[in-house]
Structure formats: structure tokens, C-alpha cells
Image (spheres, helix red, strand yellow):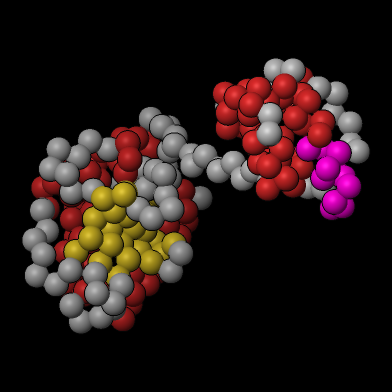
Amino acid sequence: MLRRRGFRAKIASMSAAADVKAYIDRAPDFARPICRKLRSIVRKADARLVEEIKWGAPAYTHQGIVCSIVAFKKHVAMWFQKGALLEDPKGLLQPGKNAEAMKVLHFAQGDEIDADAITELVRAAVVLNEKGVKAPKRARPVVVPPALKDALAKNAKALAFFESLAPSHRREYAEWIAEAKRADTVARRVERTVAQLEAGRKRSDAHRKSS
């Protein structure tokens, strides 16, 4: 049984390697040598990393995603899933768009690739996964409905308490009002919300009764 599992794992690894090679072969001309170099660095950094295609691009996993390599038209991006938690003494990592935890390295044609620094980043990322360290989650923004915003502007006490609340508690009020389908329901919920806030009460303090 163990021999069969080992054989299947080997076949899967060969298939994944072929898929990654095909991805790189399809990349723009400038990107191919960059992708090959990055791939070589990652694979040498830790032999336990599993190479596969995720979200259409090469990814490397060990107890979770460690990093991925993506070829674009004018640059190659190397994403670290928990980049925000990595020590980066050389300042190579850049914030990723719309990602709280992920950070990225960008490489254009002719850019130097610091193999030693990338190796250290990969190894440190593996350790984070082995320790079960969770990536920080992006907090959802609090979208205040216009009706509530207007009402709070007319009540300084309610506004002050609302702004003192944690985002999760402000979101409770905002989403409760936003869920209302009818204008009269919105008005009632806004009125009740302002009264609760003026009394210094979170929505969770009140009896949750639909109106």
C-alpha cells in the first residue's frame, strides 16, 4: 500500500512539474528566464515543497501555500501568502493590492534576482506554515447607510458613541439598516439606532427584534 501511494505521489509530482513547465513555456519571452530562475530557487530552498498549479499559476505548498509565481505582460510577480509576517531586512517585499497578508516581489526584464534573500524568505514562510501561524485577515469596511449618516449628523451624542464603537459593532447597526427593503422600515431602524446610540448601547445589547 505504501509503495502504491509513493508511486501515485511520484506520478502526481511529475504531472505537476510538466504543468509548471508548460506554464513557463507559454509565458512572454522576457518572463521565461525569470520564472525558471525563481522556480529553481524555490525548489532548492526546501525539498519538501510541493509544486502545483493553483489559480492558473505555479504555486508551492507545505502545510499550506508558501508562495506562487505569476507571469504578466511586463513583469513577473512572486507572491508570498503570509508576506506581511516575514522579516524582510533588504526591503524586497511590496504590499499586494487588496491583500492584507500577501506581499509580492516584482521582476522586470534585466532586474537582479537576489537568490539568497529569496531563499531565506521561502524558508521563513515554510516555518510559519509549520507553526500554524495564521495570516492576518482584512477587516471589512463599515459602510454607513446615508439615512443613518444624516441622522447621526443631527445628534452629537449618538454620533460620538457610534464613532467610539469597534468596527464590528458599528457594522451591526449599519448592516441591520442596509438590510431593510422598504423606506419606512429604514426610517424606523434609523430612529431606533439613534435612540440606542444616544443611550450608549450597542446593538447586541438590545433585544434583536425585526421591524
Q: Residue at x 47, y 53 (%)?
A: 5
Identify the image quadrant of the C terminus: top right
Left or right of 200 in this view: 51: left
In the image, is residue 55 above or below residue 118? below
Q: Residue at x 29, y 53 (%)?
A: 104
Left or right of 47 in this view: 130: right
Residue nearer the viewer, 56 or 192: 192
Give the main secondary structure of the magenta stretch: helix
Residue nearer the viewer, 72 or 41: 72
- Residue 170 % position (x, y): 64, 32
In the image, is residue 98 above or below residue 35? above
Magenta-colored stretch includes residue 171: no
In the image, is residue 155 above or below residue 199? below
Left or right of 138 in this view: 65: left
Residue nearer the viewer, 85 or 130: 85
- Residue 155 % position (x, y): 68, 29
Q: Residue at x 18, y 48 (%)?
A: 92
- Residue 58 % position (x, y): 35, 64
Q: Which residues are magenta?
A: 181-190
Left or right of 75 in this view: 172: right
User: In the rendered image, is residue 12 in sight?
Assistant: no
User: In the rendered image, is residue 42 in sight?
Assistant: yes
The quarter of the picture where residue 51 lies is bottom left
In the image, is residue 106 above or below residue 204? below
- Residue 188 % position (x, y): 86, 39
The quarter of the picture where residue 16 lies is bottom left
